[in-house]
Each structure stands twice: as C-alpha cells, then as structure tokens.
Amino acid sequence: MKIRTLFAATLLAAAPLAAPPAATAAAATTTITIDPSYRGPEWEGWGTSLAWLAHATGGYPDEIRDRLADLLYGEDGLNLNIARYNIGGGNAPTVPSYLRPGGDVPGWWNAPATYGPTDKDWWDPENPEHWNWDADPNQRWWVDRIKDRVTSWETFSNSPPWFQTVSGYVSGGFDANTDQIRTDTLDDFATYLVRVTEHLEQAHGITVDTIEPLNEPNTDYWRTTLGSDGRPTGGRQEGAHAGPASQAAVIEALRRAAPERAIAAPDETNPGRLVTDWYGLTPAARDAVDRINVHTYGTGQRTAVRDIAKAEQRPLWMSEVEGSWGRDFTGMDSGLGMAQRIIDDLRELEPSAWVLWQPVEDADNMVAEGNLQWGSIHIPFNCDESDTLQTCPIQTNTKFDTIRNFTHYIRPGDRFVKVSDTRSAAAVNATGATVVHSNPGAAEETVTLDLSRFKVSNRATVTPVVTSTDGKLVQGTPVRVSGGQATLTVPAQSVTTFLIDRVSAEDTAHLRADHVYRFEGVASRRSLTPSGAGLVIRTNDTAAADQLWTARNVSGERYELINAGTGQRLAVRDGRAVTETAGTVDDGALWTLSTTGDGTYTLVNLGARRLLDVSGEATADGSPVGVWQPGSGAHQRWTLKDETVGRTEVALTHTVPGRVPDLPATVTTVLPSGESRALPATWTLPAASKWRKPGTVIVRGTATDALGKQVPAVARVAVDIWTGTEPGRAKAYAGGVPAMPATVVATGRHGGRATLPVTWDPGTYETVGVVTVAGTATVVPGQTLPATARVQVTTPSEGLVDGLTVAASYTEGGYSTAGLTNGNTTDKAWSNWKSSGRNPVETLTVTLPDGASAGRAVLHFYRDSASGGGIAATVQAGTPSAAGACEVAGSPVTVTSLAVDIPLTPATTGPFCLRLTPTPDGYLTVSELQVYARAPGLGTDASVAALLVDGKAVPNFDPSVTSYRVPARDPSRACVTATATDPYAVVAVTRSGRTHTVTTTSEDRTNHTTYRVDLVRRH
C-alpha cells in the first residue's frame, strides 16, 4: 500500500481527523511531450456547413452579409477553408412554414402551387420544367462570396424533397424510428443530388469534392407532428430517418447515378452510432464510400471510428459539431468548452478536417433559450434590406476567439502529431510546430514543452498567443528553447497557441526496427504471445523472448510485426489471428497502430479490416487472441512497452578487507519505456590481492537480456572497515505503524559508504514526537553493526491511497475505469452514456490494496455539457454483496458540485461500492475517484538536537539558545553541521568569515529556527 500524504493535521492524537477540502488542487504544472514520429493524415482544413446561416443571412444588406462572410472565412475571422453546401429538400407548396428560422432551405424542384404532402408521384428529373435552377439564392450568394477562400466543397442533404419521403414532410416521419426515404424513388433522389451538385459547379465555377446524401440518419431525431387541424407543428429541422439497410440503398443508388463522384457517409450523430451504421451497410455500400464523415454530439467510441477509417483506408472528417457552454459572450466557459471539444476530436478521431455546424446563430433564438451560446457569432435571423449593423447587430462569444487559436495557426498541409497531454493538440509543418493548450483551471499554469524528439536550432523559440478574458489572441514574448525544452506560464481560464519556430523532425517510423516491444493487454495486463499457430495472452515474463516483438516498417505507418523469440510474423488469415513464417508481404500481414497519446495502442490489420482483440473480453492467462471490428474496448487496446536494452546501471556493493565480495546476481537496466528491469549478470573477478586493502574496486561483467543479447555490466565495490551507520528515518501517525527503511547507510574508517540490510526492534508510536528505534545491520555474514532510525510521529492526517482498482456496472465504449485513478481530476475518464435504455443507477466497486484502510472517498464528476450533463443527482456508499449488488447504508449524498465527498464506514479495509443515481433522463461522466486514508502528517518542529564542529558536539548545547561561541583549531577551515530534532526538517548552513549561520526549516515550511556559531581559535 502506498499513501500520499497531503498535509498535517493540527489536532491532538485523540482528536478526530482534520478533514481537507473535498477537492485538493493539484499543482498547476504540466509537461507536454510532443512525438512527431506519430503523425496523422495531411490536414485538409477547417470548415462549416452553410445551410441555415446562409439561407437566413444571404439576402441581408451587403455591409451585414459581407461582415459575416469575413468573420467566417476572412484571415482575421475564423479563417475557414472548407464549405458544406446544404441541398434543401423542401416541403410541398401548400405546407405553411413551421421550421426554425433558416431551416427551410429551398428545394430545387418546380411544383404547382396547389400541390400538398400527398402529391408525391409527379416529379420527373428528365423534365426540365420540373426543376427550378433559380432556387436557394441566399445560400448561393455565400458560395460566390467565399469561393476564392474555399479549397474543399461538399454538398449534403438533410432530407429528400417531400415527394421522395414516406410521410410527405421533410421534417421526418410520423414515427421517428421508421425509414423515411421512399424505396421506389431512390434513383430519383440520387439524381436530384447529382444534378444540383453539377449545377452549382457550372453556375458558380466551383468543384465539389464529395456528395453526402444523409445526415444523422439512424437516429430518432426526425419526427413530424401534426396538430389537431392536420397541419405540421414540428419538428423544426429537415431530417430523415434511415436505418443501415436504407442508407446502403441510398449510397448504392448514388454510386449508380454518379460513378465518378466521391461519396461521403454516413454523417452520423456520434461515433457509436456510426459504428452501428457502418457494419450494417452492405459490402457494396461500404466500398462505395470514399470518405467517412462523423459528428461528435456524442463522444464515445471516437477511437473505434478512427480505427474503422484506418482499417478501410479511407479519409475521415469530423464533419459537424456545435455546442453551448456558458451563458454570456465574455466569459471563457464557451471558449474553453469548444477548445476542449476540438482537442478531444483531434486526439481521438485523427480526422483530416474539422467542420462546424452553424457558427452563426439566431440571436433571438439564443436569448429565448436563456442566452445559450450555440454558435460563435450571434445575429438576428429576422433582419431585412433596411437594416444596418447598428439595427442588426453582430456579437461574438469566446468560442469565436478560441477557435481562432486553432484555425489561424494550424493550416492545410500540416500534420497533427502525438502529445502526452489530454488538454493539448500539436501539429508540425515545414518550419516548426504548433501546440494549442487549454487551461480551464482557476490558477495560472506552468507549461513545459518537451521538444527532445525534435532537431532544435540554437535559435529556436516558442511564442505564446493567448486568449483569455484579458484579451484575444494576444501574442506574448518569445521564449528561447534550452536543453530541448521551453517553459512558459499561461493564465487561468485560457487557451494558448504555442508557436514553435526553428525545430524540425524527420518523417521517421513510430516503431523502430532496431527495438523490441511488448504488447501488454490493457484489460488483462498480460502479454501478446504466440501459441502454436495462434496467439494468446500470457502472464508477463521478463525472461520470455516470445513475449517480445519487432516491427519492420513497410511503408508509411504500415508494419510487419515479427515475434522476437520465434521469428514468425503476426498476420490474419481466413479471419483468424495467426503466426506464420515471414514471406511476401500482403495486407493480411500488415498492421497500423493507433493511439491517443496515453501509451496504449490498437493494432489494425489492413487485410481483415479488424483490430487485434482478446476474444470474449477475457483476461485470464492463456486466453485466445483474435480479430474483431473496432469497439474502443480495453480488450482491444495494448500498452506498448519498448523493452530494448541499452546499457546497465552500475551495481554498488561492498566487502571488508581480505574477503571476496558477494557480487549481485543481476544488474538493473532502465528501458526506454521507463521501466527498470533486472538482467542476470556474470562477473570476471580481479586478482585476490585487490581485496586486501581498503579502497574502491571496479569489477566488469556481462548482462544478458531475454533475447540473449549481451551488454556490459559494471560493479563498484567499496572495501573498508565498517565502523558505524547513519540514522535512518520513517514516519508514523500517533497510534499507527511506520514503514521502516529496509536498509541503512554504513560508513567506513577510510571514507567508504555502503548500503546494508537491516532488521529493526519493535517500537511504540502512541505519542507525537520523535521515537528512536534500534536495529541491527548486516555488513557481511557474521559481522553486524548497530543501527538506529528516527521515527517522526505526528497527529493523524490524511493521504490519498494508491493502487486502487475500480470496476463499473456499465461503461460506455471508448472509456474505462482505469482512468478514474490516473490523478487527472479534469479529464473525461468514465461514462455510462447510451443513446437509449440507460441504467437507472450505476455502481462503482472499489478494491483497496492490501493493508489499506479508507475513511472517505471523493468523486470528481466531469461536466459534459453546459446544462450539467454527466453529473449525478446523488451518490451513496455501500458494501458489495456476494451476489454483486451494492448494499448501501446511511443517507445518499446530494451532488451540488463537481467534487463530492462521500463518507465511508470508518477504517474500511475491504471492497466498497458507490451507487450513482443520475438526474432524470441523465447520464454520468466521471473524471477521478480519490480514496483517503489515515496517514502521517507533516512535521512542524524546526529545532536542532545537536550542533557539531568538525564532527564533535558543541558542549552544553541547548536548543532554546540560538547563539554560540566555539573554539576550533583552525576556524577558517572548520566544518559546522547540525542535526535537526525532526528527521524531516531541512538544515542549511551558510558561512561568512568565521561566523556560521544554521537555519532549520520544519517539514511543513511554517517554522524556522536560526542558530549562530562564531568560531574562535583554540589556544
């Protein structure tokens, strides 16, 4: 058990625990490590859908609409370069307006004015009189205004025209879960989309890159409701439900209508729903999709969509999102909310473009909804030709500003790269790199950029560009890069772009051919290992060569993975993961890797279009490994550990004169992954005469890794007559038991130092103060030295318990309970979101490490939306029953803030559970679970137990007397030292001439004591 002490309580030992705040603020320091060897696709850019905003404003006076166009596509505005044109469907001529302002984007048909919703069998795409090529003038004004700034165009449909729908209305079916697109007019619908796209190209001189025929199709959003008079009252948007089979039929029809046109699909509302859609399509429909589009109104399973795109070898766009955070234009809530959404989308999806839905919103609609902050730019949607910028005002919120932190500095052609921080995104370009970092905290933050993986010019600098309540895109003073890093301070509640100049990185493979790697299952913590012709997970064995793999980069980020022990490669044949003799490389033997930067990866097989997967989500030793479609689960993620042995650390040991030392059987190597590993070592002993006299002897040998590779080993042996030991130290709270040190440092007559094993006598720790404990240290067999340790005993305080394991009754794909104990109280670690059928309560079950006891827990919720989405109504603690239920006790705790303090049964040692009840129709998102236990506090004593001159105690020393005059043989060379009463207090000695000043600082830094020692010559 490991407990991290937080602070000292000031009460007496018999008093209750001093309770810290429910949420203890972490130090505002962050290191961002940028790894340019892991690169995303070439960036295509940033964009928006035109649709409602263009239809509503395209007819405004020039000064207003030109200003809006500049705010979106101008260099000083959002600087967008992608546009999605909405091909409207349009209700029948006799249907009165009921859609939201801007939502009634006109269709391109020409129907008699008397036609109603049931007149659906009249349209002939080959009849010129059935087309209206003058339709949609407002959205087309936008096309002409921005086309010189747009590098990529897409046309998309929210609904077919009314006559190609089942209900006869473009707002959806009467049953929102029933397919709305007529099966008998699919080819006509495809023709409608293609002809409008062709007309836009010819009439406006643009080239449309893709057609997207569907929008959020497999949802229950699109429903038409009729009033008692038979007239529609809702919904207020165009939309059409289409299940996977219907989607496939639409896509295949579009492919028939335009074989040479690129198709994007399915433009689904969230990644999880896209996964359902994609695997529900026919093979022909999947093959017809040239680019995958997804929205992120839900965020679970982003990584599954990322891996689908990689498996299918298709580009991926985040093609629509918006949201509302905060309720004013000046506060940073909206800007920070959008910045984190962008960062998360970039990090987890790895798209090649990121597109807004409607950055221009109807100001009146937002006010009516309580000053919601959908969109970045607000303007009334009811202005007319007589209005000016004064009567039809434009306002921007902080989303507008923080989006520019991305769009102004990360441009088409850049490539996003891996970062270690979940609040940052980084990209590289020809001249340097760009990092965008969000600090949502209430304190300023010190940020260190680790650029050690770059080639850094001696003139390299980092320039911050900061958006906060104090200013928008405020450029700061450049900071020089030194030692491969740069450290800057950013304000609280800010988004900062770091412009890194004069650094470069070669386009090298992420996995190196001369390294060996372990793939450890995230769920099982066991290693990928061959078994016969297949694969299993095995308990980690550092000596097992067949648990290690090498990677041969074939092209780009495509690898052949070869087992280091057997020489066979990893492949997929006939839908099974196998090991086989290496030969000609085909897609079945090619793998690409994905990571969010957290050290875990998915392995995507290009031939099978599937991920390496522990079958049945098993975790036991020997469980088989196969392949399955991406799902974002822990059983599909592997912790990648670089276990390449480079050099070994010098082994330190000791002996006495005349005795050959017992050299260590192993030496330590620190792997590139950061783990220490013991390697067996053999030694070449020097001549026996080397051990006769005190001194230091260097012994050389050889260490051998799991693959049989030999590396040099060195042992440094201290030979001395060992005369004493230095006091050890430990901590305890009154009534507790200290964790005593396992070793002490021995000192020798000739200046040698050695680390000796020690055993301790029993001690009593009931009273606050310092307890000296005796022990026995073993020098060599048959020779011992007395040892002491000073134990600081404090009033009980609290500490965080490390080593927790947490299980959940349900977890949304793409999240896990592992993130609940990663120390980050602001990330979105766990979620129970489902589109429907959510559990009325969820249970988190916590297992403590051996020897730990808990007094309370703190649950940190993640606010997933401005309305408080993700936050529970109540939390209640209990004990898991044998049947797995959570048997709660006491009263539930009402959640009133992001951090909620939950009392536990005093001195809980076994598993406990937390029952979380969401708000009505709500869901749950949690950042962190902290468990607190009794722990030693921090010492407050700053006194000195002894002053020494040249190692001898000052006579008649009294800690309360702070000034001494001490004779010395040579005052100019004498050494003054001190021993603090508290072993954890800090002693500092400064000298001025013959005067030495000894300053002692208590462990908690609140108390200081100063002693003055004046040395005089001894006569």
Image (tube, grey):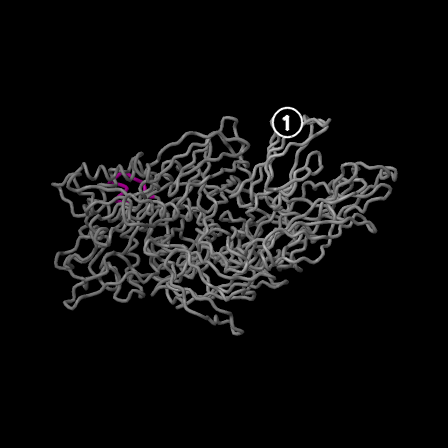
What residue did someone put label 1 on?
A: 994
Percent across and percent down for residue 875 are: 42, 64
| Residue closest to the eye, 863 or 959 | 959
Of the 4 image quadrants, the one containing the N terminus is bottom right
Q: Is residue 800 magenta?
A: no
Q: Residue at x 38, y 55 (%)?
A: 864
Vertical position of residue 44 compared to residue 633: above or below: above
Q: Amino acid at mark 1?
A: Arg
* Picture coordinates of residue 475, whole percent (x, y): 37, 32
Q: What is the total number of numbered labels drawn onto the structure image? A: 1
Residue drawn at x 66%, y 36% is 977
Q: Please state which of residues 124 and 661 is positioned toward the viewer in this rendering.
A: 661
* Residue 550 visible from this viewpoint: no
Left or right for 290, reference 370: right
761, 668: nearer the viewer: 761
Residue at far bottom of view: 883
Residue 45 appears anywhere in the view: yes
**Main SS, magenta residues:** helix
Q: Which corner quadrant of the image does residue 398 belong to?
A: top left
Q: Position of residue 314 (x, y in %)?
A: 44, 48
- Report the quarter where the C terminus lies: top right
Q: What is the x, y in percent for residue 748?
A: 77, 40
Q: Callout 1 environment at 10 Å: few (<14), some (14 to 19), or many (20+)?
A: some
Element type where label 1 sits in the image: loop
Residue 202 colored magenta? Answer: yes
Q: Quadrant of residue 733?
A: bottom right
Instruction: Kindly identify the residue that appears in the image at 41 percent across and 67 percent down.
Output: 892
The range drawn in magenta is: 197-208
